[in-house]
């Protein structure tokens, strides 16, 4: 017992500050936010009236113009397009690179470089590129479409009231496809060479090789990529603030929290935050548990 | 699997076609297609960078709807000067933010990662999972009380507050980076030998582990530097244009109703330069952090 304390006591000492900080600043503050979300603190003044889940009910049932549901719809459209775009482009790029091409390093470096840039900085240029002017007023990408006589491609981008969020996902796809590519590329390279050789000996065509042997091996990587990109999508804030600013057309829950705080409605802002947390936890917690389980088995 | 076995047991296929002759031609077409696509995507990915650079060197009068994709008629640094005037002070402040964050977070991460990679106490997996969850949460879920807590703790607003929160919320990813690093690259025997020699945990860490931790540190430092530099969410909640980092200043410069695009784009380039330099010089290590972010060791 004493040797165990001697051996591991210092270890506990070493990690206890971090555990304490995370305990307070992650779990403690989440608890606090949940408490505020169940209070009637709708103004800057303190108030501790407990109102149960009524702030949550209000968001779904009584929000003006269905604002919260609108923000969820925007988030859903954004997430679907963002996930499809990054997964397809990431897989395609990894597929094009995986057997080794000349100047592979150059392609990888360029494809991945947007990851090093902040959404705030890239938002500046995407705001310009996605200029909503058309015809003679066309700017940015619409101007290019006009020059190429592809006028039918001109569109109002994120200012479209129905499908604007599809356009909002374009810069996000630009920014994160390289990351998904890097994940898939690592996945391809991790497949034992014997598998390919065996397939070749068996006379598998290239198509069969990918369809039957290689792609199935990539399923775990694809799942990781989906979850990482998916949870980033739910938290999307910087990009939208930078491209369109906070406004009704492109509002998602993360932006709605910010807008609500500006009016000092702490209870409502907390309730939106907690829902956002639940959405993220729904995909992240099973993923973490699963990862830990596989790790313990190996 | 069953199909492959039957093929193998059939007699040697004398009549089986030799590798088809159209292979070379298909190979050429395939290769051309492959490089063509790679180049096309290269240009698409670089397109926004081209726009940023070209526009930033135009003077105010040079920007119109006509020819906005063209090179500047006259290369001018006017917009760069304007952007620097708006961003300069926050540029310096962001270094004062990102460097301490990178150093402190990595040290914390190294200590935690070492202990958690070697210490299989009961419930270690649960503790580690709880730590990791902290890096995925939407920070809005802690932001509202966080503002009150940091001011109650007496931490000065602006950069000191941001250093503190980035260090705290950087603990999970840094712990993960180092735990994976120690679990996969530092041999158990090294640690065991030190213990046999009677060295305690802290001494083992200091004299055996730290010296071989450089690669882990490079990854963690780059990761934390980049996240602190590029952060906008904490910055907007906990600072303002007078005491905050460069993303806040850039957003103020570029977010106006009718923004000066040339100055905004010069500003976006100034904002991106430090992280891009890190990425170009140390790309391999940058990717190391990205990979750690997907949890797999």
Image (cartoon, helix red, strand yellow):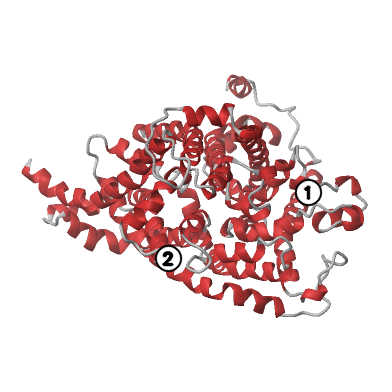
Q: Quadrant of residue A74?
A: top right
Q: Quadrant of residue A53?
A: top left
Q: Is residue A148 visible?
A: no
Dot placed on the residue nearer the N-terminal end, 1 or 2 = 1
Q: Which residue is under mark 2?
A: B159
Question: Where is residue A62 shown, x and y percent of the image?
Answer: 59, 29
Quarter of the image with the N terminus of chain A is: top left
Instruction: Answer above or below: position of B81 versus A15.
Output: below
Instruction: Answer above or below: position of A47 versus A141.
Output: above
Question: Where is residue A277 shown, x and y percent of the image?
Answer: 47, 37
Question: Where is residue B237 shown, x and y percent of the image?
Answer: 48, 55
Quarter of the image with the C terminus of chain A is: top left
SS category of the residue bearing label 2: helix
Query: Foreground: B148 or B284?
Result: B148
Would you call the spot at circle 2 few (<14 residues within 10 Å), some (14-19), or many (20 or more)?
many
Q: Quadrant of residue B57?
A: bottom right
Position of A171 with respect to B191 (left or right) is: right
Would you call the spot at circle 1 few (<14 residues within 10 Å), some (14-19), or many (20 or more)?
few
Query: Foreground: A180 or A47?
Result: A47
Subunit under mark 2: B
Badge nearest the viewer, 1 or 2: 2
Query: Foreground: A141 or B245?
Result: B245
Q: Is residue B115 visible?
A: yes
Q: Which residue is under mark 1?
A: B33
């Amino acid at each position: 017992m004493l040797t165990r304390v001697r051996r591991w006591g210092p270890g506990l000492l070493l990690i206890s500050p971090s555990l304490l900080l995370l305990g307070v600043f992650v779990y403690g503050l989440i608890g606090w936010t949940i408490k505020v979300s169940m209070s009637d603190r709708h103004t800057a003044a303190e108030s501790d009236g407990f109102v149960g889940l009524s702030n949550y009910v209000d968001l779904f049932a009584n929000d003006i113009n269905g604002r919260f549901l609108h923000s969820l719809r925007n988030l859903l459209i954004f997430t679907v397009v963002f996930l499809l775009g990054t997964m397809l482009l990431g897989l395609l790029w990894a597929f094009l690179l995986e057997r080794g091409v000349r100047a592979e390093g150059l392609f990888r470096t360029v494809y991945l470089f947007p990851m090093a840039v902040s959404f705030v900085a890239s938002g500046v240029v995407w705001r310009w590129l996605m200029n909503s002017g058309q015809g003679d007023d066309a700017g940015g990408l619409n101007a290019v479409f006009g020059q190429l006589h592809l006028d039918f491609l001109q569109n109002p981008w994120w200012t479209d009231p129905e499908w604007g969020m599809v356009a909002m996902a374009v810069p996000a796809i630009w920014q994160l496809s390289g990351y998904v590519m890097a994940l898939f590329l690592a996945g391809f390279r991790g497949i034992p060479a014997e598998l390919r050789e065996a397939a070749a000996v068996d006379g598998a065509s290239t198509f069969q090789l990918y369809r039957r042997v290689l792609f199935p091996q990539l399923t775990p990587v694809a799942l990781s990529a989906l979850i990482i990109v998916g949870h980033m999508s739910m938290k999307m804030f910087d990009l939208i603030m930078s491209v369109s600013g906070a406004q009704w057309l492109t509002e998602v829950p993360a932006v709605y929290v910010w807008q609500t705080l500006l009016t000092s409605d702490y209870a409502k802002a907390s309730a939106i935050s907690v829902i956002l947390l639940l959405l993220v936890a729904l995909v992240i917690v099973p993923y973490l548990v699963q990862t830990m389980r596989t790790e313990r088995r190996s | 699997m069953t199909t492959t076995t039957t093929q193998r047991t059939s007699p040697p296929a004398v009549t089986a076609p030799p590798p088809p002759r159209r292979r070379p031609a298909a190979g050429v077409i395939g290769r051309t297609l492959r490089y063509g696509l790679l180049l096309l995507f290269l240009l698409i990915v670089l397109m926004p960078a081209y726009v940023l650079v070209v526009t930033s060197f135009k003077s105010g009068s040079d920007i119109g709807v006509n020819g906005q994709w063209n090179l500047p008629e006259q290369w001018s640094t006017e917009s760069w000067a304007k952007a620097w005037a708006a961003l300069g002070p926050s540029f310096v402040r962001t270094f004062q933010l990102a460097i301490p964050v990178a150093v402190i977070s990595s040290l914390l991460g190294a200590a935690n990662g070492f202990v958690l990679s070697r210490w299989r106490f009961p419930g270690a997996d649960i503790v580690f999972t709880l730590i990791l969850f902290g890096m995925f949460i939407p920070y809005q879920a802690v932001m509202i009380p966080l503002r009150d807590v940091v001011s109650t703790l007496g931490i000065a607003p602006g950069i000191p507050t941001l250093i503190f929160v980035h260090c705290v919320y950087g603990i999970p990813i840094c712990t993960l980076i180092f735990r994976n690093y120690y679990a996969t690259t530092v041999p158990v025997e090294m640690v065991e030998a030190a213990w046999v020699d009677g060295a305690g945990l802290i001494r083992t860490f200091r004299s055996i582990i730290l010296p071989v931790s450089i690669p882990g540190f490079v990854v963690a430092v780059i990761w934390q530097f980049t996240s602190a530099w590029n952060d906008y969410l904490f910055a907007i909640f906990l600072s303002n244009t007078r005491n905050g980092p460069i993303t806040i200043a850039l957003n103020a410069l570029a977010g106006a109703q009718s923004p000066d695009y040339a100055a905004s784009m010069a500003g976006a380039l100034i904002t991106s330069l430090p992280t891009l330099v890190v990425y170009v010089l140390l790309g391999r290590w940058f990717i190391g952090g990205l990979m750690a972010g997907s949890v797999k060791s």
